[in-house]
Image (cartoon, rainbow, N blue to C red):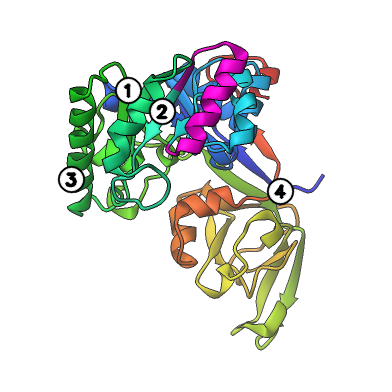
């Protein structure tokens, strides 16, 4: 087996969930586990989050909800996007809680619930400034009325999403909170009272106490990553992922040797060049070596030499410390006194930490530390 893997510290995820749940009180905590638990493994993460205090889980796809149900998880699961009309039968069968923001979705939800002879809880999403999915504020009351007009549907929640909360000093978040509170007031005045109001994502939960309302939806922070540089350190999160590999070959190359495709990197000195068995097919950005990306070998930072290739990456290890085949390499995480974070990698390639951890390829196996609430390895799957 290729000695390349992502190590997931479930105890760190449990710590983060507990911390966020305490921060959000008395609001409930919804742990967002879409995109394979942000690359961390949807089932182990979901189990850990529930045991650590999450009241609800959130996914983007019906298929993700099915994975959780097939694993035996019975916790309420919120779908963050409205399913297509032909998916509502499966939504009802799986006991998922769909988000609704279009009349077509509402009709399909009612038809599926009526066919199954069940009452289906739904959450109404309102667009307050993201301009993505969600009903307009002016349609909030009429849609809520339409939902409760059907005996098969229960208006269990109303929500929106923050667009600028990762910039804690930006005034738009306060405007969104104000807009949403006004919508809630209008819904209450129209006779809608028994629903969960939620708008806070990780950033808003951490930086805007007034945003927490009845529930918060935390994604990136569950995995120990701050939503932005501006929010680093404001909550004592613990990073849950370490990406490790081992040196597969070492060459002694003279000064002037060009490395990798395109010869974008040329050694300025006689050096040790290490090859490591991980590449862009595993999710490592191809340009990382051209923009200052590094790895950790022997407790030292070493620059990536040239472009990352599909299956291999080359590293300039200098001559001060000998490097050998089999030496551990850390691409994300801690080794010795140094740490490479997802945010650092993201900064090198002009993106965000969210993309770095969710782009990990299926060739990169996940190795889990034992669940902090169980001793059985089988419980992690």
Secondary structure at badge 3 equals helix
> Residue 127, image x and y in percent?
33, 44
Badge 2 vs badge 3, beta-carbon distance below 8 Å: no
Q: Position of residue 340 (x, y in %)?
A: 48, 54
- Eyeballing the image, is 239 above or below 349? above
Answer yes or no: is residue 259 visible.
Answer: no
Work out whether residue 50 can be spotted.
yes
Mark 3 Cα shell of 10 Å, populated few (<14), some (14-19), many (≥20)? some
Outermost residue toward the bottom in this view: 256
Q: Nearer the viewer, mark 2 or mark 1?
A: 2
Specify whether residue 104 is painted magenta. yes
Q: Which mark is residue 196?
A: 1
Q: Residue at x 60, y 68 (%)?
A: 304
Secondary structure beneath dot 1 equals strand
Foreground mark, 4 or 1, reads 1
For residue 38, which quarter of the picture?
top right
Give neighbour class at mark 4: few <14, some 14-19, many 20+ (Cα, 10 Å). Answer: many
Q: Which residues are magenta?
A: 101-121
User: How far is mark 2 from mark 4, CA to CA?
Assistant: 41 Å
Mark 2–mark 3 distance (CA, rounded to whole Å): 23 Å
Report crowding for label 1: few under 14, some 14 to 19, many 20 or more residues within 10 A (C-alpha).
some
Q: Position of residue 11 (x, y in %)?
A: 50, 27
- Residue 123 — which label? 2
**Horizontal side, residue 161 vs residue 209: left or right:** right
Residue at image coords 61%, 17%: 115
Residue that extends furthest to the top in the rendered view of this protein: 117
Mark 4 or mark 1: which comes first in sequence? 4
- C-beta proximity under 8 Å, tags 2 and 4: no
Q: To which residue does mark 4 refer? A: 4
Asked if the residue under mark 1 is in contact with the one under mark 2, i.e. CB atoms within 8 Å, the reply is: yes
């Amino acid at each position: 087996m290729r000695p390349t893997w992502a190590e997931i510290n479930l105890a760190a995820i449990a710590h983060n969930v507990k911390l966020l749940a305490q921060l959000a009180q008395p609001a409930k905590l919804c742990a967002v586990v879409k995109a394979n638990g942000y690359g961390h493994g949807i089932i182990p993460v979901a189990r850990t989050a529930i045991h650590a205090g999450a009241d609800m889980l959130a996914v983007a796809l019906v298929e993700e909800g099915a994975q959780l149900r097939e694993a035996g998880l019975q916790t309420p699961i919120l779908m963050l996007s409205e399913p297509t009309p032909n998916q509502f039968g499966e939504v009802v069968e799986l006991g998922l809680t769909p988000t609704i923001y279009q009349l077509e979705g509402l009709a399909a939800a009612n038809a599926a619930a009526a066919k199954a002879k069940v009452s289906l809880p739904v959450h109404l999403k309102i667009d307050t400034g993201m301009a993505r999915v969600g009903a307009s504020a002016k349609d909030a009351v009429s849609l809520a009325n339409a939902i409760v007009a059907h005996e098969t549907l229960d208006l269990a929640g109303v929500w929106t999403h923050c667009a600028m909360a990762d910039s804690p000093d930006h005034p738009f978040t306060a405007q969104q909170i104000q807009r949403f509170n006004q919508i809630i007031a209008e819904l209450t005045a129209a006779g809608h009272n028994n629903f969960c109001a939620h708008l806070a994502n990780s950033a808003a939960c951490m930086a805007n106490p007034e945003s927490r309302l009845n529930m918060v939806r935390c994604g990136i922070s569950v995995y120990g990553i701050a939503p932005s540089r501006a929010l680093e350190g404001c909550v004592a999160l613990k990073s849950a992922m370490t990406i490790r590999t081992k040196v597969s070959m070492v060459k002694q190359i003279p000064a002037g040797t060009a490395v990798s495709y395109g010869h974008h990197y040329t050694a300025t000195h006689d050096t040790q060049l290490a090859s490591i068995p991980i590449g862009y097919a595993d999710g490592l950005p191809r340009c990382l070596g051209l923009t200052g990306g590094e790895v950790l070998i022997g407790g030292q930072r070493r620059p990536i030499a040239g472009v990352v290739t599909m299956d291999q990456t080359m590293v300039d290890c200098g001559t001060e410390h000998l490097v050998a085949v089999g030496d551990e390499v850390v691409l994300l995480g801690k080794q010795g006194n140094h740490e490479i974070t997802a945010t650092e990698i993201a900064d090198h390639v002009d993106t965000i930490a969210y993309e770095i951890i969710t782009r990990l390829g299926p060739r990169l196996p996940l190795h889990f530390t034992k669940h902090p609430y169980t001793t059985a390895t089988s419980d992690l799957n």
